[in-house]
Image: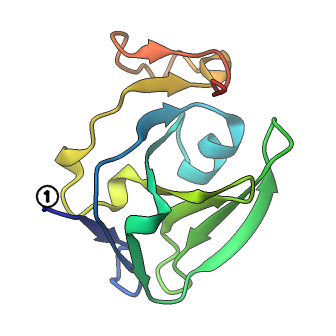
Amino acid sequence: MDKPYTGGCACGAIRYSIAGEPLFANHCQCRDCQRESGTGHGSYATFPRAGVTVTGDARTWDMTGDSGNVKTRAFCPECGVAVYMTFKAMPDIFTIRAASLDEPARYRPQAITYAVRAYDWDPLDSSLTTFQTMPSG
């Protein structure tokens, strides 16, 4: 078995372990991700939900994306760090914030999403596949 992806919040109250490799890894420049990250983008890795174990009690809030689908963002009530995200329309996936990984160097972004909302002051790797919104399919 490959080494699991592990991580959590800054204070350690929320921890996760994920078996398997990411299905998708991206930098998202949508306005929701900008607000949550406090910068020009959020960086994420998405995994099959079946391989995920989470310990600790996260606080959550729901928001509706441009697609009309609800995404639930989870954060630590102790330290306030955003850790993961789930999607009501896609219950079989689990998305983590790349910086929440114990070994962030394992994160390998594949694409940039929502480039239509990019800012010049937040340049990203121009060699990545870039989508103006969120790709479908």
Residue 77 location (% of width, % of height): 56, 84
Who's the residue at 67% across and 74% down the image? 60
Residue wearing tag 1: 2
Residue 11 location (% of width, % of height): 35, 82
Between 10 and 135, the residue placed more toward the observer is 135
31 relative to 57, above or below: above
Residue 18 location (% of width, % of height): 32, 66
Image quadrant where one finds the C terminus: top right
**Mark 1 surroundings: few (<14), some (14-19) or many (≥20) residues within 10 A:** few
Who's the residue at 34% across and 18% down the image? 125
Who's the residue at 61% across and 60% down the image? 86
Q: Amino acid at mark 1?
A: Asp
130 relative to 98, above or below: above
In this rendering, the count of numbered labels is: 1
82 relative to 42, above or below: below
As helix, strand or loop, the secondary structure at mark 1 comes to loop
Tell me how the rendering is colored.
rainbow
Q: Quadrant of residue 101?
A: bottom left
Left or right of 93, for residue 108: left
Residue placed furthest toward the right: 68
90 relative to 134, above or below: below
Between 104 and 89, the residue placed more toward the observer is 89
Left or right of 46, for residue 116: right
Residue 20 location (% of width, % of height): 28, 56
Image quadrant where one finds the N terminus: bottom left
